[in-house]
Image (tube, helix red, strand yellow):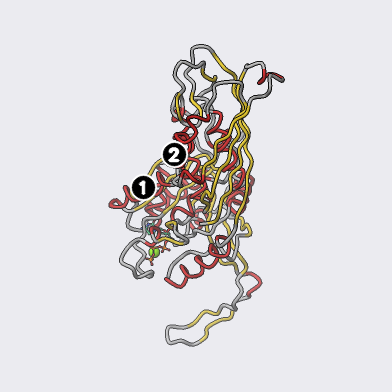
Amino acid sequence: MLSGASAVIPAAGRGERFGRGQNKVFTPAAGIPLLGHTLGAFERSESISEIVVVVGAHELDEARAVIEGFGLKKIKAVVAGGGHRQDSVRLGIEAASPDTEIIAVHDGARCLVTPEVIESTIAEARASGAAVAAVPVIDTIKTATPDGLVDQTLDRDRLWAIQTPQTFCRDLITRAMREATEAGFYATDDAALVERVGHGVKLVMGSYDNIKVTTPRDLEYVESKLGGRVKGEIRTGFGYDIHRFLEGRRLFLGGVEFPGETGLDGHSDADVILHAIADAMLGAAALGDIGVHFPNTDPRFKGSSSLLLLEHTAGVLKSAGWQVVNVDSTLVSERPKIMGRALEMREKIGASLGIDSGRVSIKATTAEKLGDIGRGDGAACYAIATIERI
Ligand code: CTP
Ligand code: MG
């Protein structure tokens, strides 16, 4: 089994060309800070196992708030950057897990990157050691003399505009970075350090949308791109869950406790209604299922209320640009009778999702004594969720 790749996200610049007197990565686009969009793409990339975020020393809390707000769970560390981008990248690499084999460096300001581009640089770096996202240059490029005279016209067929992710075998980038640091060599991208030690760097097709937000005009472009995706798009997802009753466990359904009733078996509180709803939400956004986002091994949710899991699921959706419109659920169980407490459940679920309880529906039926559920061995729940672009 291949070990996962570590993402290092330099986001410690000052955004001077952006001209708003603050680090541009915290500027919102479609309601979400640029950094949130960027981190969301890495969170969704299957090969990425951890993310190191590098921001200014005074921005650590602001970055943590973005991470917390979106329930990002791959964040390994948030560290302070240095004076040059290259220093920030070095500090980020130093904070990655020591056993990581691949490092994917990506500018925090390139917030339209897609998991597909990230994955292709990782695959190529595993094969050849170093791979960067790039696109063929569209304009003809000429060099000029200091007094503005054309010096040379370059062969456009051989020109590529270099982007990030720039992805490397860890040993290679670590060695290249150390040698550059010792020599006081600085470059505008990471691949240049690897080229300097004589290792080939493979170009991988990036995307013309994968721009580095530099000026306010770029923000307009990003907004229009996200806006195209956001406005009016509605989706529906389906979720199902089932748990077995187990003597000695407390019973939680829809975020409320039923004292004196035998509970359901599971890693968390085994709240079958909330799990079905969370799966429906993730399904609507095509973001996998709760097993992917909250594995049984995740200590954060052991024995905890699944309302927390639901809140984190809403965060995962938010980082992908979605919010919940409404959820509907049907519990299938012989006992207990739950409808007397449906309002309480709807309020708790609504609070976790950040929506009005009028958008949360709870229903229940027995299985008419048919099958395993009918025998009272366990409880199941079906749910659907409708979500919309934010
Ligand atoms: N960066 C960094 N540390 C620095 C400088 C830059 O981590 N000392 C990051 C930026 O936050 C950005 C990426 O490197 O995500 C690319 O840099 P750039 O686009 O130049 O961003 P800024 O340096 O913030 O912008 P400017 O050059 O206009 O000040
Ligand atoms: Mg800069």
Rendering coords of residue 309 (x, y %): 48, 35
Rendering coords of residue 283 (x, y %): 62, 43
Position of 161 relative to 140 (above/below)? above
- Graded by Cα atoms within 10 Å as few (under 14), some (14 to 19) or many (20 or more), the crowding at tag 2 reads some
Rendering coords of residue 310 (x, y %): 49, 38
Q: Quadrant of the N terminus?
A: top right
Give the residue type that dot 2 points to: Glu
Closest to the observer, 278 or 225: 278
Residue assigned mark 2 = 347
Closest to the observer, 311 or 351: 351
**Image quadrant, ligand 1:** bottom left
- Graded by Cα atoms within 10 Å as few (under 14), some (14 to 19) or many (20 or more), the crowding at tag 1 reads few
Report the Cα–Cα distance between label 1 and label 2. Answer: 25 Å
Q: Identify the element where label 1 is drawn.
A: helix
Residue assigned mark 1 = 65
Position of 235 relative to 160 (above/below)? above
Closest to the observer, 159 or 180: 159
* Image position of 351 (left or right of 295): left
Residue 47: tell me if it is visible. Answer: no
Residue 120: tell me if it is visible. Answer: yes
Rendering coords of residue 345 (x, y %): 47, 34
Q: Residue furthest left?
A: 58
Residue drawn 42% across the image and 51% down it: 89
Q: Which mark is residue 237?
A: none
Give the residue type that dot 1 points to: Ala
* Image position of 57 (left or right of 142): left
Q: Quadrant of residue 242?
A: top right
